[in-house]
Amino acid sequence: MLNQHIPQYCGSCWAHAALSVLADRIKISRILSSSYNNNNHNNTAAGANNNNDNNNNNIDDINLSIQHVLNCATDMAGSCHGGKESGTYQWIHQKNGFVVYDTCQPYLACSHESQEGFCPFIDTTCTAINTCRTCDSTECKPMDSFPYASIAEYGVVKSRNVTEIMAEIIARGPVSAHVHGASLHNYRGGIFNDTHADRHTTHAVSIVGW
C-alpha cells in the first residue's frame, strides 16, 4: 500500500482507491478460479489432498500503476489536485483499454500541473515511455510488451442504502467510496455513527468488508 503524499503532496486518493479496488477484484477472481480448478483436479483423484489454501497463498498481489493514470487520464479522471474513481474506470474501459502494473511506471506523486517537490522538473506527459519503461545504468526506454489490467464493465452504487453496498462487496469484491477525512481522525474502531459529522467528502477509500 502506497502513501499518496510520498515523495511529495499529491491529492490522488481517488486513483489509489480506484486501482486498489480493481487490483483486489482481480486477485479475488484469480483465487476463485484457482480454487475451482484445484477442486476439479482433486475430484479426479481418489484420496488426493486438498491444497487450495496453499495454492491461494501463492497468488501474487496485484499492484497497478497510479502514475500511469496521473500521466494519461487527467482529462477524464483527475490529477494531483483531485479526481474521481468512476473517471478512472471510464478511462480504462472506454478510452485507453488498460492500465499497466506499477513495475512499468512507479508512483512519483506528480501530475502535469503539480508544482510540488520535483514535479516541475520531470516529464509526466502521456507518452510510450511514460506508460511503461525499462531502464539500465545509462538510459530508459519504452516497452512494447508489458503486463496490464483491463475491465469489462464498471458502475456506481448510487443508493445510500448500505445493504446495496454490502451486496456488491459480497458479489464482486471491494468498492471505492468517498468519506469526510477529518471526521475520522479520532476513529478507533467499531461502527462510525456520528450523526453530526460533516457529510462533505474530502477523501476516497476502498471498502473491503465490515
Image: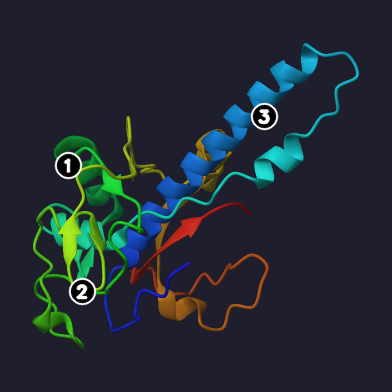
At label 3, the amino acid type is Ser
Q: Which mark is residue 110?
A: 2
Q: Circle 2 sits in a helix, a strand or a loop, which is it?
A: loop
Q: Which mark is residue 96?
A: 1
Circle 2 crowding by C-alpha within 10 Å: few under 14, some 14–19, many from 20: many
Residue 133 horizontal/vertical position (percent): 23, 58
Q: CA distance from mark 2 to mark 1?
A: 20 Å
| Residue found at x 20% / y 62% | 70
Q: Which residue is mark 3?
A: 35
| Residue found at x 40% / y 43% | 159
At label 2, the amino acid type is Cys
* Depth check, front residue: 127 or 162: 127
Q: Earlier in the sequence, mark 2 or mark 1?
A: 1
Residue 31: quarter of image: top right
* Depth check, front residue: 124 or 83: 124
Q: CA distance from mark 1 to mark 3?
A: 32 Å
On screen, residue 82 above or below 77: below
On screen, residue 43 above or below 17: above
